[in-house]
Amino acid sequence: MGYDVQDFAGKPVIAVINTWSDLSPCHSHFRTRADEVKRGVLQAGGFPVELPAMPITETYMKPSPMMYRNLLAMEVEELLRSQPIDGAVLMGGCDKTTPGLLMGSISMNLPAIYLPAGPMLRGNWNGEVLGSGSDVWKYWDEKRAGNISDCEWSEMEAGIARSAGHCMTMGTASTMTAIAETLGLTLPGASSIPAVDANHSRMAAQCGRRIVEMVWEDLKPKDVLTEASFENAITVDMAIGGSTNAIIHLIAMAGRAGIKLELKKFDEISLRTPMIANIRPSGEYLMEDFYYAGGLRALLKEIGQLIDLNCSTVSGACLGADIDSARVFNSRVIRSLADPVSSSGGTAILYGNLAPNGAVIKPTAAEPRLLTHKGRAVVFSDYNDLAARIDDEGLDVDEDSVLVLQNAGPIGAPGMPEWGMLPIPKQLLKKGVRDMVRISDARMSGTAYGACVLHVSPESYVGGPLAFVRDGDLIELDVPNRRLHLDVSDAELALRREKWTAPPARYDRGFGALFAAHVTQADKGCDFDFLHAGDETPEPEIH
Ligand code: FES
């Protein structure tokens, strides 16, 4: 390879873990960024080595990218363990890459710094500002209702994603990178910089310089991660109106650090945290506006009284010091605690006989009239059943019905795809209906919206109560009282359970079989049971 001994002898060897691929639009700038990281590593006296890791691309992976988050985490952990590495820069941003990279590096616990891909620029079409995902869902309904043409749809496609970077709404990607920064795993301010801004390149080189120092300081992820830093992350998740997916990822990440997060904790923090980031889908603006308004550092400063500012970060200082000089430059985008977008956080946890271990809803993204609702169930046994019947003009459904999708959970789908924003039946779209109560054991894109009850646990495929709902059953949703209730007697439910037979296994071999055997339910973070924190894996012997 042309290296001389003095290139690396006595120097920290830094892995630049790069999730670039030709199928990862969100990471399409990572080849250049990897070079910029290496520039920083060399400047600081380290020796950079670039290691590719599994790209998990939200848009293309089947059956669901979520199925591969744990595989990326395993790959990262074993890459760092098996190779002669002293520290790592982790390059990710598309939804599952942030938790996957972080989970692996937390388990390995070598010095590591996260380099977030940064959001793409605002979308632009016909003079309108478009947001990733959110406007796709919105205009897809208009297309199904016959209000926009194929040609207009193609123009929109060309205008909505016009630069490198991850989705620029407050979807899962923006939520998870903000969480990574709040946890102290990125350089201060890193998560808000748009992917193609020159400051993003500067930040990449800084990551390279800082990781070399971190190796000498022996500053590792578990030195930074504490119960307080995870509570900070949940608070930020609520204050930004973050994606519901963050709940699953945060539980899994905390588990790797030996910290147990209960679903109830999310509700507690949600109730006391106003949502102040006015970003779509719960607000009006986009991530580019958020950056110009001061970015995450300014938001953290604004909610300073709600978080623990003494938590350490990879900067080597504490969170309070990292945000000390931050300011809000546009109070329409980053609102104040006194003038929030919503007085409580973006997520509510529901319990009841339909979700004994919990379910999740994003009330800020739903039509308020639906947050207290009672309606009769229209049940779809799986996604194929949904696709076959949802637009059938003969479907017995009205705007008060509750759409239920079964077998869309972690094992049942498999991989718990983002099917939770069930489509509104075409016959109702034509009447102007744009939101309905929908319930499933699936997830929902962080860019999506609607009165969608998600992550119902346990899932229907393993015999959770969702499996026993039938057409016409009455279902009550009461978000203010955090209740999700199936109006069917216990005796009748027990009878239905007795008659229920478990569906056949989806996989006999390979990763799918491993996944089904070991993935935990949504309320436990969907990590593999054997990857939860335990005794440290010993350093391999060198022979
Ligand atoms: Fe990568 Fe949305 S597709 S973040």
Image (tube, grey):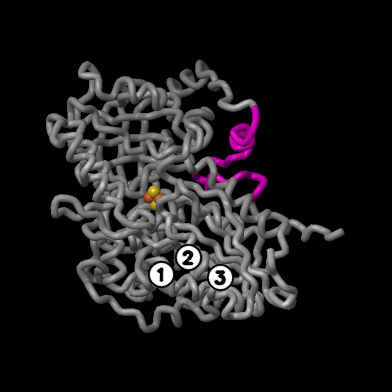
Residue 220 shown left or right of residue 159 in the figure: right
Name the secondary structure under disc 1: helix
Q: Which residue is mark 2?
A: 33
Q: Which mark is residue 38?
A: 3
Q: Splitting the image into 4 quarters, where does residue 9 fall?
A: bottom right
Query: What residue is shown at x 55% (from left), y 77% (from top)?
Result: 209
Residue 155, horizontal then vertical, whole percent:
21, 44
Residue 32, horizontal then vertical, whole percent:
47, 64
Residue 32 shown left or right of residue 88 in the figure: left
Please indicate, yes or no, whether residue 489 appears anywhere in the rendered image: no
Query: What residue is shown at x 30% (from left), y 62% (from top)?
Result: 287
Mark 3: give few (<14), some (14-19) or many (20+) Cα within 10 Å: many
Q: Are marks 3 and 2 in contact (CB under 8 Å)?
A: no
Q: Splitting the image into 4 quarters, where does residue 113 fall?
A: bottom right
Q: Give the quadrant of the C terminus.
A: bottom right
Above or below for 230 versus 304: above
Residue 134 shown left or right of residue 267 in the figure: left
CA gap, disc 3 to disc 1? 14 Å
User: The residue under label 2 is which amino acid type?
Assistant: Arg
User: The residue under label 3 is which amino acid type?
Assistant: Lys
> In the image shown, does 64 or 256 lie closer to the viewer?
64
Q: Which residue is mark 1?
A: 200
